[in-house]
Image (cartoon, helix red, strand yellow):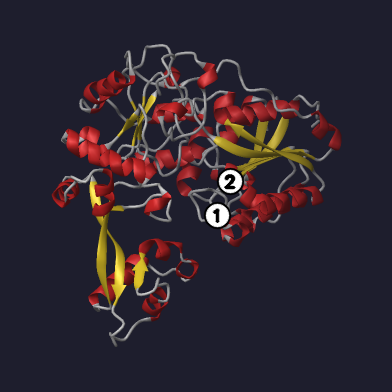
Amino acid sequence: MNTNKKFTFIDLFSGIGGFRIALKSLGGYCVNFSEINNDALNTYCTNFDEGIEKNLGDITKIKELPPHDILTAGVPCQSWSIAGKNLGFDDDRGQLWNDTIYLLNQSKPKAFIFENVKGLADPRNQDALQYILKRIKDAGYFASYYVLNSFDYGVPQNRVRIYIVGFREKEYSLKFNIPAPLDKKLRLGDILSGFNGKPIENEKNIQLDLFGDSSPKRNMSLSNNNNGFNDYFLFNDLRNGHSTIHSWDILNTTERQKEICYFLLKNRRKSAFGKLDGNPLSLNHFKSFDKNITQDELDELVKIGILKEEEYLFRIDKDSNKNLSEEENILLGCSNGNNLIIDDLKASRILKSKKISISKTINSLLEKKIITCTEIRYDFKNTKISTGLFGVNRIFLPTSNIFPTLVASDSNDYITLKEIFAENEDEYKKIFITEIYNNNNYRKITKNEACLIQGFPKDFVLPENRSRWIKLLGNSVSIPVIEMLVKSILETGIVF
């Protein structure tokens, strides 16, 4: 055992060791760890020169923990994350909280740190969070939770997580304080390999909304430079702003085609055209904006891949005596008079609860000639915001303050090492398209950069395959945040 240790700890759901690096740097000695993912386990043992015998394995099979001072756990987050199904304790993975608190109660360490996605702190999960806190209290601990952004504590990443910190003795809980965010923050350009410029200091414009919507709201973005321009470009047909790149900006289109696209962009969210947040529009709708718009013009935008056709309204043939499936009968029961309207079907609770596929069932009814499509509408082909356009979601300039949250599944976010200087918004966008996008002057972050974005050493040993190392880093904690929390625990004067 390390004779210079200040305290001992056990690392549950250890992943690749983000907790361990932080605690070890402050004098902690790892008694044991628990991990079941082979890739994470191999990476952990390689980087810490640790024997596999120290792995406690599956937490659900651990009966008791050996004595230790601090318990850490990055409890798997799928049950609470926005990207998951948000089933909470109805999801088997959410039961891992019960196993974690059981071991906390059994081993009685003097303090603990648990980490999870911010979704656990959302109002919709209030009951679940309160249940977790009550069980922690019942185990004899005084605990509080904190929602913190990694960017505030030493990494250039917008990563908001919930941290639950608790003490067995009340006096230390009362003395525990989260320090204020760092005055001097690390920014994206500070960690980019090959960038020799200096990120622009503009603290007041650091915001956290990932999707700037329009020019008047442009300071609601990941960062702005001193000219008020966004330091990233969003590839999206559903938003508009000075740094939004649309498909018609980068495909060969006429000014007339651009005008038609803007008609759709500006009107698809209006309630006059449907009940949904975004609605396809018919030819007659387009003609209400410009009576000279023709069917051929819409067809051409479909042909070049900007718009897509959507069957929207269907007439029911009540004279049909075809045999129908249960799903078909249920869907037909959602009719509006003699019509089926896609808006109504998408809003139907019974179709959702029974998990009936609208498109599959509609196609089946069309094949049986039970219904006939009577109205075609048009929407943008690319309507999933996070996917972006043509494989690109966002491209960040090196002057950007923050890179978005690293996620285990990777993302379509890129960086460029080229800075842009422009006098106005039109010039800014034009330079970006000409010099960066058209010249393929952008790339994904490298493994070393991803390490630094999470606070790991840039030479941390990870698998070579990108999908493997991005998953490992995306599932990890940001080391500087954990270091800050442990320092704050030690500053309470707690005696180990």
In the picture, residue 422 is in which quadrant?
top left
- Placement of the N terminus among the 4 image quadrants: top right
Q: Amino acid at mark 2?
A: Gly
Whole-percent x, y for residue 168 in the image: 81, 40
Q: Position of residue 105 (x, y in %)?
A: 77, 50
Image vertical order of residue 90 relative to residue 5, above or below: below
Q: Secondary structure at mark 1?
A: loop
Residue carrying label 1: 86
Three-letter amino acid code at the position of disc 1: Asn
Determine contact: label 1, label 2, CB under 8 Å: yes
Percent position (x, y) of residue 372? 25, 72
- Residue 2 seen anywhere in this rendered image of the structure: no
Q: Secondary structure at mark 2?
A: helix
Check residue 119 in the rendering and tell me which mark sits there, or answer none.
Answer: 2
Q: Earlier in the sequence, mark 1 or mark 2?
A: 1
Instruction: Report the side of 362 relative to 408 (left or right).
Output: left
Q: Determine whether 50 is above or below 376 in the image.
A: above
Q: Give the CA separation, mark 1 to mark 2.
A: 8 Å
Residue at 26% x, 41% y: name it. 261
